[in-house]
Image (tube, rainbow, N blue to C red):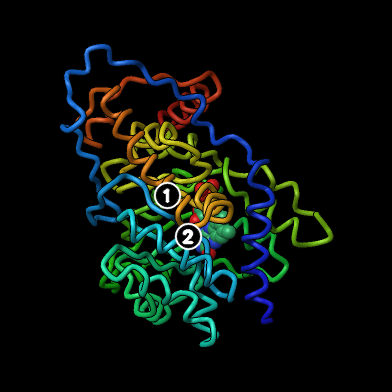
Amino acid sequence: MNPHSHRKDEHVFIAEKLYEAQSRNGLEQIKLFPNNLPEIAWNEVDMTTTLAGIRIPAPFFINAMSGGSPATAKLNEKLAIAAAATGIPMATGSESIGLKLPEVESSFSIVRQTIPNGIVLGNLGADHDFKDAKRAVALLKADILEIHLNAAQEIVMPEGDRNLKWRKNLKEITSKMNVPILVKEVGFGISPRSLHQLEHLGIKYVDLSGRGGTNFAKIENQRRHAKDFSLLDNFGLTTAETLIASRPFQGKFSFTASGGIRDALDIIKCLVLGADNVGISGLFLHTVLKKNSAGLIDLIEQLKHQVQALMVLLGCHTIAELRHAAFTLGPELYAFQKQLQDQQKEK
Ligand code: FNR
């Protein structure tokens, strides 16, 4: 098997192996307040929202994971069956390998075949130029293209990119592409300084993808014998931290939150903190591997039901109203927010 295809299989295998050992995403430090007079009926809840500017029926989707080998083709098909049955969008893993090796193209295009009418997101690294980005969109007839920023992962990977100069590509792709571009991390979070830079590059849609779920420092360390980069195991911002840090930018971007989302309460907390929607990878991978597409469909339907129930409990008719829900931060997150605010004042 081609070594790149082998890597795709290893990522899935190791991500699943480490699933139970995932660290905290910080959302446990968000305390939501009850709304004791909610004044709302279940059927008044509107769960629709937008993903990279496109309207979607529920505030979460299947985030990038799979494709590039026979085993990940099967996995993509199973994920796509669940996406098609439930109407939630689905992203493929990086199509980079599909652009290089014609024999694995179908491990990606199977997603569009299985979801003829739903929303499909393509995925590429920021080392690719506009020409590649156009091919990635065409391969899937993608509605949205995710571009991942994965500096920490590249550093840990022995075969990783050693030239991390991505801004020119990002600017060109965003200005020329005819579908929305969603720039994402892969589980290390995005800092305020990087948000400033992304804003200047013309980016409008950002998936903050924080720490606390799938951890590519740990995954890449497991793949090699010398674990000399285990010092990055706790690198980056948790999902809660990157969401807090992004709050001053809410008028400038539409945010996706991801990283260690495990239940409907995590989804709601991300929306309260200002995300417009939430991406889920590890939990859906774990579910589809253990319980197949049928089990994943059940989980997605259950999540929709629970999100609706929590919106009722908070008295919120829309996702936008969730932004006004009352909450407090635990001491660690509060100190994090205070330091950021103090730094901002000093500038
Ligand atoms: C990923 N992720 C990912 N992201 C990306 O932009 N391109 C990719 O090719 C991949 N590949 C990939 C493979 C596997 C097996 C997993 C589990 C994840 C990262 C993913 O989209 C997400 O940003 C992180 O996994 C954090 O979310 P979870 O997994 O904690 O919900």
Q: Is residue 241 left or right of residue 151?
A: left
- Badge 1: few (under 14), some or many (20 or more) residues near its Cα, within 10 Å? many
Q: Which residue is mark 1?
A: 279
Q: Residue at x 29, y 22 (%)?
A: 313
Quadrant where the N terminus sits is bottom right
Tell me which amino acid carries mark 1: Gly
Q: Is residue 9 left or right of residue 78?
A: right
Q: Position of residue 103 (x, y in %)?
A: 54, 86
Q: Which disc number belongs to residue 28?
A: none
Q: Secondary structure at mark 2?
A: loop
Can you tell which quarter of the image residue 6 is in?
bottom right
Q: Is mark 1 within 8 Å of ligand 1?
A: yes
Q: Position of residue 211 (x, y in %)?
A: 56, 43
Q: Secondary structure at mark 1?
A: strand
Can you tell which quarter of the image residue 305 is in?
top left
Q: Position of residue 285 (x, y in %)?
A: 54, 54
Q: Position of residue 131 (x, y in %)?
A: 39, 82
User: Image height check: is 303 above or below 156?
Assistant: above
Tell me which amino acid carries mark 2: Ala
Q: Residue at x 48, y 73 (%)?
A: 95
**Closer to us: 264 or 206:** 264
Q: Is residue 196 visible?
A: yes
Q: Residue at x 39, y 79 (%)?
A: 139
Q: Which disc number belongs to residue 64?
A: 2
| Discs 2, 1 touching: Cβ within 8 Å | yes
Most distant residue in the right direction:
226
Tell me the distance, in whole angstroms, between the alpha carbons under discs 2 and 1.
9 Å
Q: Is mark 2 within 8 Å of ligand 1?
A: yes
